[in-house]
Structures are given as structure tokens and as C-alpha cells.
Image (cartoon, grey):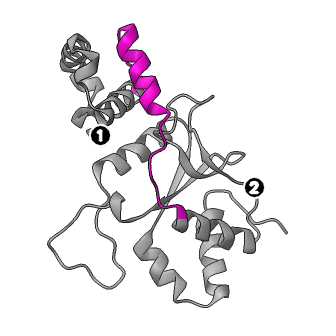
């Protein structure tokens, strides 16, 4: 899992294969739900790096099953941004879609808001996407994103998506601005990625 998050699977291919074989020797009943989800993510990251990890049938079935479970997210944050974007004329997006062709990956790597035509992923990052830091940050300055969040961006980019991450602290600062300034923010940032509001 750590090698997947760090984007170092291919350069450690032999070690990954040994670890994968060891995981596949484990009794299916002794693996936790979260661990099955991580194993599915490892296989998806490996695939994006050109590696093929084969799981035995029982393990593959369990990984696929756990990948279909909805992972809790920032629903209120997503709803608010959806309404804001629609108000500013951005209508060509869908929520919660897979970055893969088809539905590979289940619920694990869904894009928060996808402009499919432009292949732009708008990811909305609540507090769980950031590292907890003991250092004081400046007003509205966001801490560093965690490894899983960075790895998801890297994976989406390897699949051809442009990724724009919008964090909750940036949003708090943005919400203090007048509506026209908020509209300018979205037009500028999404426009740089080729997404324009409807006229």
C-alpha cells in the first residue's frame, strides 16, 4: 500500500510481487474490510503503472465486493460547490464517476465532479485529505495533502485527467468574497483547464 501511495510500485516490482503473493496466501476471513479496499487500490495503482497483479478467485471477489461499498465523503461540501458552479453557468459536469473506462475501481476512486468532455476532475478536499500538522499555518493556508489524496491525483493524471483540487480552507476564504469574485475564481481556474461556463 505504501509503495502504491508513493508511486514507487514499478521500481519495486519484485518486492510488490512477493508481497502480493503473500497476501494471496492469507485466509479470506482474516482480512478486514479496509484492507480489502486497500488491496483493490493497490491493484488499480499497479495497473496504472503497467503492472498486472493477479489475485486468486476468492481474494479478487472480496476486493471487488469491498470496492463497491460507498466511502463516506464531504456530501455537504460537494452539494454547496455543485449549486455554486451551476449558478455561475458551469453545467457540463457529472458527480461521482469513475476515472476509468467503465466502472473499474467501484466506489474507491470516484471523481467528485467530472467535466468528461474536457477530462477535468474537480476534487473537493475536506479535512480528511490533509496531513495533521503541529505547525501553525497562515490564515487560510492549507496544510499538505495526505499520501492517498496525492496518489489519487497522480493516478487520474496517468489516465489522462487534468486535476483541480479545491480544499475546504480555500473555500472558506473564497466564501468571504463577493459573488462576482467567487465567479471569477471558478472561471479563471477551470478556464485554465479548458472548462468554460455556458453562455
Q: Residue at x 36, y 33 (%)?
A: 37
Q: In the rendered view, would you say 195 is above or below 152?
A: below
Residue 127 rendering spot, x and y as whole percentages:
35, 65
In which quadrant of the rendered image does the C terminus lie?
Answer: bottom right
Q: State the residue in front, 177 or 56.
A: 56
Which region shows up in magenta?
A: 49-75
Look at the image and tell me whether residue 53 can be seen: no
Residue marked by disc 2 = 92
Report if residue 171 lies within the magenta region: no
Q: Residue at x 29, y 49 (%)?
A: 147
- Rate crowding at label 1 as few (under 14), some (14 to 19) or many (20 or more) other CA atoms within 10 Å: many
Helix, strand or loop under label 2: loop
In which quadrant of the rendered image does the N terminus lie?
Answer: top left
Q: Which mark is residue 5?
A: 1
Q: Is residue 88 left or right of residue 96?
A: right
Residue 146 rendering spot, x and y as whole percentages:
29, 54
Q: In the rendered view, would you say 161 is above or below 31?
A: below
Q: Quadrant of residue 7?
A: top left
Amino acid at each position: 500500500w505504501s509503495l502504491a501511495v508513493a508511486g514507487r510500485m514499478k521500481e519495486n516490482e519484485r518486492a510488490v510481487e512477493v508481497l502480493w503473493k503473500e497476501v494471496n496466501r492469507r485466509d479470506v476471513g482474516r482480512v478486514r474490510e479496509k484492507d480489502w479496499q486497500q488491496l483493490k487500490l493497490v491493484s488499480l495503482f499497479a495497473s496504472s503503472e503497467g503492472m498486472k497483479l493477479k489475485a486468486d478467485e476468492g481474494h479478487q471477489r472480496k476486493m471487488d465486493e469491498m470496492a463497491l461499498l460507498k466511502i463516506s465523503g464531504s456530501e455537504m461540501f460537494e452539494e454547496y460547490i455543485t449549486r455554486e458552479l451551476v449558478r455561475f453557468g458551469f453545467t457540463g459536469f457529472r458527480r461521482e464517476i469513475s476515472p476509468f473506462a467503465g466502472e473499474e475501481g467501484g466506489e474507491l476512486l470516484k471523481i467528485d465532479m467530472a467535466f468528461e468532455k474536457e477530462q477535468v476532475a474537480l476534487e473537493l478536499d475536506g479535512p480528511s485529505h490533509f496531513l495533521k500538522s503541529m505547525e501553525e499555518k497562515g490564515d487560510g493556508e492549507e496544510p499538505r495533502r495526505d499520501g492517498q489524496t496525492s496518489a489519487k491525483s497522480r493516478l487520474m493524471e496517468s489516465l489522462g485527467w487534468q486535476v483541480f483540487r479545491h480544499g475546504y480552507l480555500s473555500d472558506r476564504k473564497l466564501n468571504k468574497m463577493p459573488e462576482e469574485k467567487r465567479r471569477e475564481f471558478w472561471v479563471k481556474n477551470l478556464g485554465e483547464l479548458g472548462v468554460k461556463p455556458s453562455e
